[in-house]
Image (spheres, rainbow, N blue to C red):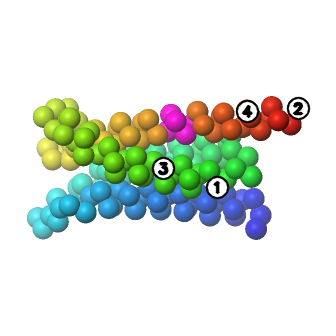
Amino acid sequence: MNTKNKFTLLLILSSLIVLGTNLYYNFADLIISDGRWKTIVSVTGLFVIVYLILFGLVSKKFLAERNYYFMIVFSIILSIFFLTLQPAISRAFQDNRAFYVAGYVLTAPYLIVLGIGIVAYITLVLFIERLRVKNKV
């Protein structure tokens, strides 16, 4: 498998892990029959898509071919981190109306976890690549 196909495949798998976590979070504990789920999935999906675009750009620019599997490992860790911290973050920000969209979609878990996630990913990728370059010398 060539480098471009390998990168694309692993980026798609990483994206499916994060998108699957988003859908699980949105549909696991609530079944909304009045149609609000469309707004919830759309708004939360926008946060995930912005994260995935940044994730892909950072991976393409800084990650070496032999470290492409790190994308999947990081996506799994981020998903576990999100599902673990989401209830605590939701409770902490439930009374703060600034973090709600359309009055009922809480965005604080996405802003906090995905924000920390992309900063941590950039830091780890740069650290891994610096170690790789340092070991070549």
Callout 4–callout 1 Cβ contact below 8 Å: no
- Judged from the image, the secondary structure of the residue bearing numbered disc 4 is helix
First in sequence, mark 4 or 2: give its number: 4
Of residues 10 and 47, the one nearer the viewer is 10
First in sequence, mark 3 or 4: give its number: 3
The residue that appears at 14% across and 44% down in the rendered structure is: 103
Mark seen at residue 77 = 3
Question: What residue is shown with label 2?
Answer: 137
x and y percentages locating residue 102 in the rendered image? 17, 45
For badge 3, the amino acid type reads Ile
For badge 1, the amino acid type reads Tyr
Question: What residue is shown with label 4?
Answer: 130
- Judged from the image, the secondary structure of the residue bearing numbered disc 1 is loop
The residue that appears at 26% across and 39% down in the rendered structure is: 89
* Residues shaded magenta: 118-122
Q: Is residue 121 visible?
A: yes
First in sequence, mark 3 or 1: give its number: 1
Q: Quadrant of residue 1?
A: bottom right
Foreground: disc 3 or disc 4: 3
Residue count near mark 3 (Cα–Cα under 10 Å), binned few <14, some 14–19, many ≥20: few
Question: What residue is shown with label 1?
Answer: 69
x and y percentages locating residue 112 in the rendered image? 35, 36
Is 110 within the magenta?
no
For badge 2, the amino acid type reads Val
For badge 4, the amino acid type reads Arg
* Left or right: 11 in relation to 104: right
* Left or right: 123 in relation to 78: right
The residue that appears at 35% across and 38% down in the rendered structure is: 111
